[in-house]
Amino acid sequence: MRIYSPWPALLAVFLLLLPLQAQPLLLIGQSNAEISGAFSYEFLKSPLSRPFDKGMANVSFNLPFRASAQAQRFLNSSSDSAIVIPDLFARVAQHVNAHIDVSAPLFGGVAFFAARENASLSVTGALGNARFNLDTTLEGTGSILLKGSIHMPLAFDMEWRSLSFGYAFHPAPWMALGFQIHKHSFIARTAGDLRPDLSGRIAVGGDAGNTSFLIEYPDDKVYGIADGRYDGTAWSPELALGIGPVRLVSRMGARMAAKGHLDVAYSVPYFIDPGTFQPRFTAPDSFMASDNLRRLLDGETGKRDIHVKDNLILLLPQSHSLSMDLWPGKMSISYSKVFGRVSIHNASAEAGTPILADTTAPADSDEVDTEGFVDLDIFPDQVINLAMKFAWFHADLGAHTLNVSYRKQGHILSGISPFEWDGDPIVPIFDFGFTWGAPLEFNVDFFVMPLPAVRSGVTYAF
């Protein structure tokens, strides 16, 4: 698929593609953007971390917060800018991402259950009361005047949740064995709606003569709409073995085929090709051609409807962690090796045979397929961590390597850090927290790096 989000491209048609001499102007009266999300590290909890001699019930959640700011503080506006935003409001928020963990002694071991919201992400934005004013000249002889308003709301949501069931026991006094199985659930939704309402005049001149005519593109003729939803489930096992002060945890990977759809419909002015978003013609004499002139006077448009039903494949890698107690009950060190990657891509890309989307398009438009529609890979290769716990204080200090590939562009993060391992930047790990109370225990954790979060919880031992 050449263009995956048509609504920005429709706007860019007027701002970027025409060979204009003067800069266009987009005056945005009201606009806002919000990004919110959260990530829970509880998914990495070992099956051997629960007590064997007592029951425990834990409820924890990220402390929700919201920060707002005028985006002009972060945007360097200039007098010759093509887009004027007098009042852009931006918000950043953290989701709650609740977590429940219950364990109890059973048959000489401990059985446990956990429900987690592992990760979530929401992105919303809207342009309201946006005034479009284009008054410029074409190459040669001619001018274009377009005025109107633009309304464009956007939304994207993603959630990854899991249910975990497990059991751990001591086959010998010096040995511990545990296992658990995770059921993963993934949901992604997106929606967008571009509604311009434009009208104006085009004046052209050339060897064929001079002319001037009115043009109108109301929101029922020029628009962009997108709607999609994907959801899926998968299972993954996890095993843990402890011998004296040494423990090995093996987390198996998972492959999830999320079923769903993405529907995109858009309409652009006739002089823009809906398949490539390139101008069909720009020379002044081209506007005077009888066939083109008739289409412009009639406000003719090019439309395309795209229906993508290709499955979305999500891959979770397997990892193996080896840890050892340096100071029993107070300090331990661990090393983890990840085999594979966190990946999101289309099923057709995995099979190597792109699936054609169901499209309705003009005959002169390009055919659309799903190859490369979603293609994201995250490589968390190696992790080393030092865990400490002294009375009411606990902390983690370490580092891990990380890199990202997106749409066949590999090693995107290479070079951003002065410290690298085999071309992958080294990302620090640092978090700390406090625990107090008994038998009702309260805790607050501050995750500083790599993903910041503030998490609070309460644990009852019985």
Image: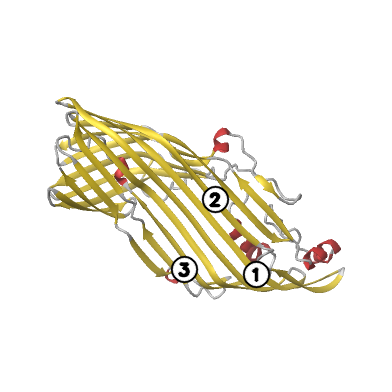
Residue to which mark 3 is pinned = 75
Q: In screen coordinates, is 24 left or right of 289?
A: left
Image coordinates for residue 240, horizontal then vertical, percent: 27, 30
| Separation of residues labelled 1 and 3 (CA atoms) | 28 Å
Q: In screen coordinates, is 417 left or right of 353?
A: left
Residue at 32% across / 42% down in the picture? Answer: 43
Looking at the rendered image, the disc whose residue lies closer to the viewer, 1 or 2, is: 2
Instruction: Report the amino acid beneath label 3.
Output: Leu
Judged from the image, the secondary structure of the residue bearing numbered disc 3 is: loop
Image coordinates for residue 34, horizontal then vertical, percent: 44, 62
Residue 228 appearing in the image: yes
Across the whole image, how many numbered discs are drawn on residues? 3
Asked whether 329 or 106 is in front, the reply is 106
Residue to which mark 1 is pinned = 197
Residue to which mark 2 is pinned = 228
For the residue carrying disc 2, how many other residues have a C-alpha within 10 Å: few (<14), some (14-19), or many (20+)? some
The quadrant where residue 44 appears: top left
Instruction: Report the amino acid beneath label 1.
Output: Asp
Judged from the image, the secondary structure of the residue bearing numbered disc 2 is: strand
The quadrant where residue 162 appears: top left
Residue at 34% across / 40% down in the picture? Answer: 163
Instruction: Report the amino acid beneath label 2.
Output: Gly
Outermost top residue: 172
